[in-house]
Image (cartoon, rainbow, N blue to C red):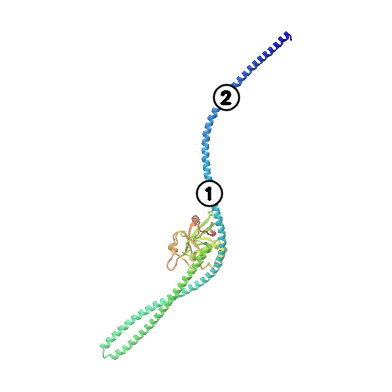
Amino acid sequence: MSTTSKHTYIYTILLMSLSAILGGYVTSTILDQEYKQIFAEMQKDCQRSQNEYLSCRSNLVDETYKWSANIRACQEHVERYIGEAISAYKLGSDGLDKAINRTQDYEQLQLAVTENMKEIEEVRSTLAHSNEEVEGLEKERAKITRQLQTAQNELENAEKELEVRDLERAECDTKYRALVTCEDTLNEAAQGRVNDEESSSLMLKQLSGQVQALKDQGERKETMLQEMGSTLNKAEKELQSCKTETESIIDKVDFRSRRDVVKQYGPGPHYVRMAIASSPSSPDAFNGNILLKLAPLDMMPHTIDMFLKLIEEKLYVGGTFILARDHILAAGPFDLVDREKNQRMEEEMIQEGYFPNGALLFQQYTDDYPHRKYSVGFNKGGPLFYINIEDNTDVHGPKGDDVGDPVFAAVIEGFDVIESILASPRKNEDSLETQVHIIDTYVMKAQ
């Protein structure tokens, strides 16, 4: 290789090295600028990130505080919810136990209902038999009542005759004393008038005859008085026998009535609800219920048994309140406006033996259950009943030989209905201008 070629080659290498150095310097400068620019941007980003970090940290502290509060609230809510859930679980568990118990009770109730249905059939059979017995007892009662009336009349006649005999005996005693006086006078005359012995003897015989006649008359009257006394004693014994027999019949009726009520409704207390409604055409129309609590069964078994039968047989349904006075409110199976309906109800009462002589075989009254305000009583033997608006013990209670109207229940609900009835317009005879009907009646279970 020539020297020129070597020089050219060296120059070329130098140029290439210089170019490489210049290119590297330029590239380095450019990269340095870009690096600085990137570094500056990174510093800005870092500063911005730091600011954002500080802001986020501040916000995070606030949020952390809020979250802490929320967590506490949430924790309290969760604890409360868990407590409620536990309580609900306990209640649900108790309810499940109760449901199981009620299911068992229901099964037992079904068995009891089946047994009760059998008992009801037996009661119906017994009731039919009892009705026959009651009819027989009623006939026997009527017979005994007639015998009592006859005995009472005989007793009154015997007492009158005894009074007449007492007057006659008093008259005889007066005459006897007069005769004794006459005998004394005759004795004195016999002693003082010896010359008139024959005349005195004759007079003495006459007077002696009169005395003997009066004595005989007195003996006859004494015999009659003894006979009257014997008759009177016999009448008193018959009357006492009739009273004993009547009391025995009453005891039997009460026993059977108590037995029938306990079999069908239980021992009590017993409740009866009546649905009441006034005529819809009335401008002040109203409706509601009256709840009655019956007297204790042992106080008046026959009366309570009869009222429950009247309720169960729906005898009062369709009836009306027929009378409204300041002291009573009367109702019964009557309709004073619809005569055909009233005739049907009256025929039904006659067919059942409740009218016209009353539903009760005898009246029962006790001072332990008097005619207080809002008590309910039968008008004599029923089936007409009335609600006392005030204390009517002096009016409807016992007076002399009258035992008083039976009081068998008391109003415990529905006082507003009673006040509405009392506020209704009345006619001159105290009947209501607008009818108030008994819509339905039923016996309630013991409360």
**Relative depth, front residue between 184 and 112:** 112
Relative vertical location of residue 147 with respect to residue 20 in this rendering, above or below: below
Q: CA distance from mark 2 to mark 1?
A: 61 Å
Q: Position of residue 389 (x, y in %)?
A: 46, 59
Q: Residues within 10 Å of mark 1 (few under 14, many from 20)?
A: some
Query: Toward the viewer: 266 or 217?
Result: 266
Please, which residue is most extreme toward the front here? Answer: 1
Q: Can residue 332 be spotted in the picture?
A: no
Residue 156 lies, in percent from the top left, at 43, 75
Residue 133 is labelled as none
Residue 115 lies, in percent from the top left, at 56, 62
> Which numbered disc covers residue 91?
1
Tell us which disc is closer to us: 2 or 1. 2
What amino acid does circle 2 point to?
Answer: Cys
Where does the image place residue 171, in percent across and percent down from the top left? Answer: 35, 80
Report the residue that reaches farthest toward the top: 3
Quadrant holding the N terminus:
top right
Q: Which mark is residue 46?
A: 2
Element type at mark 1: helix
Q: Using the image, determine if residue 98 lies above or below residue 77.
A: below
| Residue at 57%, 60% in the rendered image | 111
Q: Amino acid at mark 1?
A: Leu
